[in-house]
Image: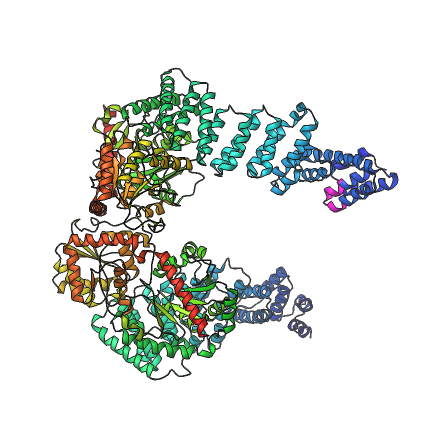
Amino acid sequence: MTSLEELDSLFAQGEYAQIAEFCQENFEETGKVTFVWLLGIAQLLEGNEETAQLAWMSQLYEASDEQVEQWSLDIFRLLNKEAIRQEEQDSLEHAWLLRCHAQQFNESDLQNKLEAFRLSHQLNLLTADFYQSLELSKTLSELSESIEINVLEDYRETLIETLKISLQQFPLLDLTYELSEICARIFTSDSLFLDTILDASLTIYYAHRLPLRALRLLDLCYSYRPDHLDLLRLIITVKISIGDFDAAISLAKSSCELSKTLVENVVCSYILIKTYIQSGSAWDAAQEEAKNYKQFLSKLLNNSDSALRKASVSWLFSGGFVLPYLEDSPESNRDYINAIGSFCKREMDHFNPPQSIEINPSNRLRIGYLSSCLRRHSVGWLARSLFNNRDHEKFEIFTYFVNALERSDPIQDWYEQSSDTAHRFGLDSANQISNQIMQDKIDILIDLDSITFDISCEVLCSRPAPIQATWLGWDASGIPSIDYYIADPYVLPEDADSYYSEKIFRLPSTYVAIDGFEVAPPTLSRKSLGLEKDSILYFSAQNGMKRNPEMLKLQLEIIKAVPNSYFLIKGLGATEMLKQYITDIAKDMDIAREKIIFLGIDSSSEIHRGNLSVSDIVLDTYPYNGATTTMEALWMERPIVTKVGQQFSARNSYTMLKNAGVKEGIAWSNEEYVDWGIRLGLDKELRDDIAWKLKQSKRSAPLWNARQFTQDMESAYLAMWQSHSNSKSL
Amino acid sequence: MNQELAKTAFDEGRYLDSLAIYRQLIEAEDQCLTNYWYAGTAALLTSNEDEAQTIWILGMSQVPEEETEAQSQVFATILSRAANQHEEREDFLRAWSLRQYIREFGPVNPYNLLALLRLSLELDLTESNDELYLKIERTLQQENITEDDAPRLVQLFSAVLKLQPDATDFGRIICALTSRLSRQQHGLLADELMPIIIKVGHFHFNYPLAIAVSEQLYDALPGNHKILINLVSFYKHENLFEKAIVRVENFCQLASTEEASLLGSYLRLRLSKESCLEWDKLDELVSAHKNNLDGFLKKNPSKSADNDLIWLLLNSPSILQYTSDNPRLIRRYQRELSQSCCDKVFPESTRFQHQKARVEKKRRSNSKIKIGYLSHCFNNHSVGWLSRWLIQNHDRERFETYAYFITQSDNLTFANRFFVPYVSCFYAVGVNSREIAQKIYEDEIDILIDLDSLTLDVSSAVLSLKPAPIQVTWLGFDASELPTIDYFIADPNVLPEEAEAWYKEKIWRLSDVYLAVDGFEVGVPSIKRQKLGIPEDSVVYLTMQNAIKLNTDVVQAQIDILRQVPNSYLLVKGLGHRGAVRSLFETIARKSNVSPERLRFLDRDNSELTHRANLSIADVILDTYPYNGATTNLEAMWMEIPIVTQMGRQFSSRNGYTFLRNAGIHEGVATSFAEYVDWGVSFGTDGGLRRKISQRLKYSKHSAPLWNSLAFTKEMENAFLKMWEIYCDKK
């Protein structure tokens, strides 16, 4: 007769065969069911699941309901106890096995289920099926109804872990959503839960690119934290991405009302403006809000002893982004942008004090290209010349791909192969990048992002290279540690030096040039659009941010004045809201609805370019021109009408036309814009002249002479280097 | 006494028993050495490898020096027998084990090594095979191969070949072996070897090796057309046209039958055209070829004639299309030849029959018509680029489309992108024409579209078996005149009015143009005038045809244009013997007082997309005659560059004409070389005219049927339906 203590120590030693024997004997002798339970456990641990089940069932089958209830709990208790011991002895598989079986004897024990979940995850055995079989949300729900809240607190840590793992491994399952919902409900004021859910939705949105799923979780969080600004901002972003501008605007307004600190005021106001502009149909509201925004911004920038969080500074870099869309006032806009640049650098220096740089010993100049866009992206399409045509003997190219770890992209691969050395970085890597650049002893760092990417801004603030210049990505950033902004004779007016903090380096002809674009066969035709072959087709393809009512009206005036003409409008943000807005304006101007045709975006850039051949004339936007879109139109030999302004973003099309050798279509006022539009629509020969000129221009015009452009750029590099050397030796 | 017992046991396979006895014998210090060899073998065969080694080493230590070689041979013989026995029983592992020891302790023996290779392939033990291949190669080169050895070796070779050894390594072994075999033995081997040599060349791209082996085989078996065909093909890849010509001449001299003569003159003429060598001999070669065609057609091929050879003759008339525009004659040749070859190789009794019942069944069930597309060009080949539009646009409500891609390659990238998603079923079929025809028949294809015509023997074979009741030739080439083809797709312009009389097929003329595309993918240009040393303001002509399409008349005309247009340049691009092409142009240039400085010979681009983009360096494209470009003209038109073309009467001489006409352009279409030159000069000196044409080409994209593949598809589909109706009524 073996005692329970003896059996217990046998368990501790893992002598399961012996235990089985003894239990068998003891049960035969005493008839105590406990021995059957223990027998079963031993069998289980020996790998004889069926035998274990048989043993237990054979007793339970004969038992009364009461007995079953009691006995089930007993078995459960014993299994639980053994599971704990097994885990202490590091036999995780056994522990898990025991807990899985324990579940069947007590469905309502949450702790056991959570442990089983955790163990399966540790053992890498966590499958969706198993997850579902645990019915965690159901159990949790029932539990929460029957016991006190403070008891649930005991589960808090385990539940957070469980929730985290579920969101990580099964982010898209309904189960996970249910679990999130219940946790949020039970632990209402517990920010850790909501933060966990929030993080998961970030991943679902950014990495998995599933806005609706992300939104589901985000709305859940929102219902408990309607005043959480970061949350609001994320929801707004997602809503915009699915085109729900009504919701986005309303949320943006709420966030403005909720904002308390000055920084929050700035951020929320900015978001509201951007949302207005992106909707393409709230222009006046945007202008109004811009006034508030500038006030907030000024206050913030003039506050000399603010100590902002790093995240806020990062955000603030791009604070000037919306300004050129709103008005063509480069002096005023650049004041703000420069002020932001200085402010942010000062703040950033607290976090990343600048370090000393070593000189590159080799006799080839090391050029570093810093970019998040050297891939299938405007910048990616346009920067290839410098890699294709460079002088290997004089220059070494180092490329730093920002936010590029997850990405697989043929153009990115091309850049990588065309560089002498290339490094890829993920998010949150500014320090790593700066260090790498310093390690590589880069002489001239070329910034292709400007204010469009905060990590790049951070890198440039820390000045990892002796010479830094911004090119191509956007207007200049105003960051004090950037020495040059690369331009040409046309894209910046003569007096621009007075309001740029960078030194403007004007290349002799053009600030950008390429060998050409890849073009696919068109997928549209006049026939497929239901149009006659001799109709006049005007075309505008921009994202919604670049559209404003003033330009739309000018464009529609042109359409109205040219018989048999149509306006093809294409672009992101061409939501129902925008379409309605445009058709309303057209209606007010007595223009037939059929003359406006909305096109969906094409599945690739190559197809977009191919489809340009369907149209006759491209109408540019103002105060924010097309850039790549203009170049594509010119490559496809389409005449363009553009209004030239004062700021960089209002002169891109101008410099491109000049560098393609075309002067037609360049307007200096609204009247001229309309005149050109009408003239081109009525005069086929003129259109043909321009198209022919554009065709011929491909042979030698500066815009298409990548080799010459590269030579000019490389001369610029040498001049910058010389200048730097001279100033050092002074 | 015991020894006998032991040996008997051994022979009967009772190795344990035999081993026991041998052990005793050895213990008792019996002096017979063979005991050791047998004992060890028995031990090895009963999984006592350690003991085996011990016994053998013991035995070897007792061998007197002068007997080493002899005993080594005895050893090898004993183990060999055992190995053979086990191989027969397919006990490959034991056999392998034995042969390893033969290799280690026996004399050098190529047969054993080869057998070892075969076993390693059977057992998938291929890791250390590199060394083995090398050893075999060396052994074959050095060792004596007796008359007796040879057949066994050849047999073993066949066995190994079936197991698909590494082609390049094995190719070298083949080379070593064939150099030691007699002619008779070569014959045995040739059939087995050719497929693997083809792999070595066309799939592993080791042309030098393929050439080396093929040359040896051909030297041993001169006049063997199979070897010759492949050898010539390998030579071409290495630009060794002169060598190919020598071989073909030799073949021609040896030819004793009409069919062999015809094949010879065909290959000879073709080589001459493709290489751009031998301008002075051209007329002679054409004459000889026509004579051979007459000769062959006069008498029916004998029953004993090799079917494979006969089939190779199928497109022998088509080469004449490159040398003259005489459709009446060439079509007649083709018709008679196709009839004759088809009747010999695929007589009616071997072709598929189509039941009336099926027609009824289809009518009643109103099910979709099944269209099959047969081609070896569903990749980045002209036909692939051009045919995809029709296939993509098919109305899936009314038609089920099947594609049969004749290929031996794994690379289906192009097909996957442009064809597979658009058809109901896509099959990569091999090169066995009967199997392919069977598949098409079983799939119950109603209308089979032939995209290859005479350009591939496998396709012609498939079509000759008539696996579908209606067969239509489109796009790939001029019609094949096979008796089993019903229709040839044309349009009002690509064949002149009197053409119906020349063709056996019924000509189905579409209303506008026999082909339409939505356009081409164009990449980024990679050449500039400056880089080629050409001034920006010069007039640049471009000719971009493969050498086979060139002839002295065309080149003379192009040079004449240059002569009359000041500050003009001619760019020459295309496949062919570069040296010869260059020489041709430069010779004619010098003779005509045009400086060769005005010529540029361009390399091929790395992709079609770049090639198309690079076309825009030219002001004018110069086409060829009597064989026009087709895809090249379409690409030039897509890039909106004026073309000068000369048209004749045959299909291949009217592609330029039909495409330009469809775009509404008559300028640049000449009917004689004089006119061609005139147009070339006009285009060169009149920038306004060039611009006018370019513009018209641009606007044609809005409305010409040539660029509207959807409308074209609808028209083709109506044609298919009509063909089906006609067929049903006939039945």
The spot of residue A258 in percent (x, y) is 47, 21
| Range drawn in magenta | A41-51
The spot of residue A377 in percent (x, y) is 36, 40
Q: How many marks?
A: 0
Quick one: A182 or B604, which is closer to the camera?
A: A182
- Dominant secondary structure (helix, strand or loop) of the stretch shown in magenta: helix
Work out whether A145 lies above or below B261: above
The answer to whether A345 appears left or right of A666 in the picture is: right
Q: Any magenta on residue B237?
A: no
Residue at x 13%, y 64% (from the top left corner):
B592
Quick one: A433 or B91, which is closer to the camera?
A: A433
The spot of residue B633 in percent (x, y) is 27, 59
Picture quadrant where residue B371 is located: bottom left
In the image as oriented, which residue stretches furthest toward the front?
A590
Residue at x 18%, y 51% (from the top left corner):
B534
Which quadrant does the N terminus of chain A fall into? top right
